[in-house]
Amino acid sequence: MLKPPYKDTAKLRQAIIETCREMNRRGINQGTSGNVSARAGKRMIITPSGVPYDRMTPDMLVSVPLNGKGKQKGDFPPSTEWQFHQALLREKEDMHAVVHAHPVHSTALSINRVEIPACHYMVAIFGGNTVPLADYALFGSQDLADHVTGAMKERSGCLMANHGAVVTGETLEKALWRMEELEVLAHAYIVSQTVGKPHILSKGEIDEVLGAVANYGIKSS
């Protein structure tokens, strides 16, 4: 397990690829629709656009400056969603990875333009009493990057209207963990509405949980 701060090495690039493959193995993502990035100094390393994960190699990943200046480095174009990856890593200095995917239940809620309320205490691992919904914009656009970073200003995950979901993580492993937890929450919230009216935890109840989950989840070694 790699420990931040990350450096642009073959090990980091392979870890990014393995994170993508693990998303597909766990059913969090399908095909090449998701993307993963990690902070490496003043740059980020991100998956290329349109390359199947089982054919991806470390040299295919792309290096992009976090400050918006300088050239992208790589033989392949970066993921079309590189702009919100860049913005999130630039604005959240304590986060070292971004995972974006189209999990079925999270995407279903995003299609209905519904955020996830405090239906379960694990909502708190995203930083508040909701998993918010970012407004819709064309994929790969600056508008979408602005919507996502706005929705996640005080959160480590959000749904993206008519699109999917995105999370940040202190490590690659924790970002993947958050994405899986987000999909579990979305699934549970949808199912709960088929058997009655979900009971939503109060702000006070979630505030109590927030302190208890500050260091919850996968730890760096």
Image (cartoon, rainbow, N blue to C red):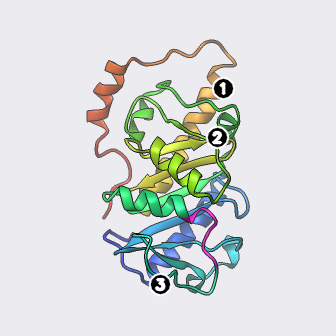
Give the amino acid type for the residue marked by disc 2 in the picture. Answer: Ala
Q: Which residue is mark 3?
A: 10
Q: Residues within 10 Å of mark 1 (few under 14, many from 20)?
A: few
Q: For the view shown, which residue lies furthest in the top direction?
A: 196
Whether residue 173 can be seen here: no
The N terminus: image quadrant: bottom left
Query: Which of these two is toward me, 178 or 111?
Result: 111
Secondary structure beneath disc 3? helix
Query: Of the residues under marks 1 and 2, which one precedes in the sequence?
Result: 2
Give the amino acid type for the residue marked by disc 1 in the picture. Answer: Val
Query: Which of these two is toward me, 167 or 30?
Result: 167
Given this view, does label 1 or label 2 mark the residue nearer the observer?
2
Give the amino acid type for the residue marked by disc 3 in the picture. Answer: Ala
Magenta: main secondary structure? loop
Given this view, does label 3 or label 2 mark the residue nearer the observer?
2
Q: Which residues are magenta?
A: 77-82
Whether residue 74 can be seen here: yes
User: Which residue lies at the image location 51% right of the left edge and 15% below the top edge?
Assistant: 199
Alpha-carbon span between mark 1 and mark 2: 20 Å
The C terminus: image quadrant: bottom left
